[in-house]
Amino acid sequence: MSRVLTLRPNAKINLTLRVGPRRPDGYHEVRSLMQSLALHDTVVVSERRGPFGLQCRTPGVPEDHTNLAWRAAVALWKAMGREGEPRDVHIRIDKAIPSQAGLGGGSGNAAAALVGLNVIWGAKQSRRDLAKLAATLGSDVPFFLQGGTAVATGRGEDLYPVDDVQRLGVLVIKPSFGVSTADAYRWLDEDRAAGLPDAPEGRDVELGWPSGGVPLVNDLTAPVARRHAGIREMIDACVEEGAMGAQMTGSGSAVFGLFSEAAATRAAKRLRRPDWLVLLTRTHSRREAVRHIGI
């Protein structure tokens, strides 16, 4: 009987994202506090004879080699020492995480593909081996193999797990426009060259750590908000509805607000706008995230 694996890679937010100078390899040095959310896609990996295939019915999501999950399949196939194109597996991606939002949907799908294909193909790659492959696919991909709460450094692939934050309600607001990662970092470089300031740190948010609160800050917020005024409007709307703190995640265009779970539910009803997708979710622990992705 053909095997079928169902994995549920979580979304992520960047509670903090500090961006340093551009490196010789073209990437920027970053330091980020990353956090898993209960919001997730569904990735179904099925054993099926014939050429490799990938399906996703969400408009705008590629179903070819430009999809990170497809690239994950190619990377693992080569790591197994096999020649030619990958085969004998079909991947279906059911999207709930918006694209071009800074929530890591594509990266999480790639991580899930690595995990599922490792089982279906009998590749016997260790978690460390998978993490090395993940780093070749994208800066965020290794995070989704462990989830929870972690500090990311380098270009984002060097991870240091930290204690889980307390369970918090999270509102994610995705506007009608998206932002590409390349654009966000280019705008940051342009604004810094012009002498424009980065965004100031927000107020401290209590995450349940004895060391105290953490200010929500994202160096990409200011340059993106200068091109898209809706970013600041969404952050301010979350704060006005009682968020402990709010910030843009990653390179945007999504914004998140942190609340108690009850307050998040109430705020979600009041933040509906015709051009906003409002998603109610919560923080996920490392144990929950690992269980979702099947490691």
Image: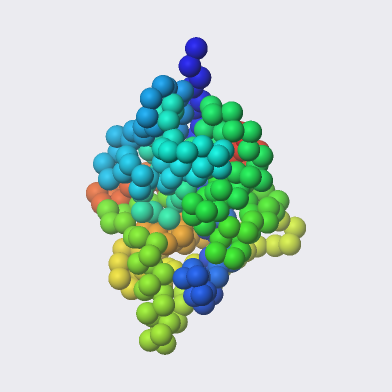
Quadrant including the C terminus:
top right
Examine the image and state in which quarter residue 225 appears.
bottom left
- At a point 52% along the width and 33% down the height, the residue shown is 117
**Residue 286 location (% of width, % of height):** 64, 43
In the orientation shown, which residue stands out farthest toward the front? Answer: 83
Examine the image and state in which quarter residue 79 appears.
top right
Give the camera-side residue of 246 and 263. 246
In this picture, residue 12 sits left or right of residue 56: right
Give the camera-side residue of 287 and 92. 92
- At a point 43% along the width and 55% down the height, the residue shown is 102
- At a point 47% along the width and 48% down the height, the residue shown is 107
Q: Is residue 224 above or below residue 276?
A: below
Give the camera-side residue of 162 and 109. 109
**Residue 178 location (% of width, % of height):** 31, 56
What is the basis of the colouring in this image? rainbow
Q: Is residue 3 above or below residue 13?
A: above
Q: Is residue 63 above or below residue 22?
A: above
In this picture, residue 257 sits left or right of residue 206: left
Residue 176 appearing in the image? yes
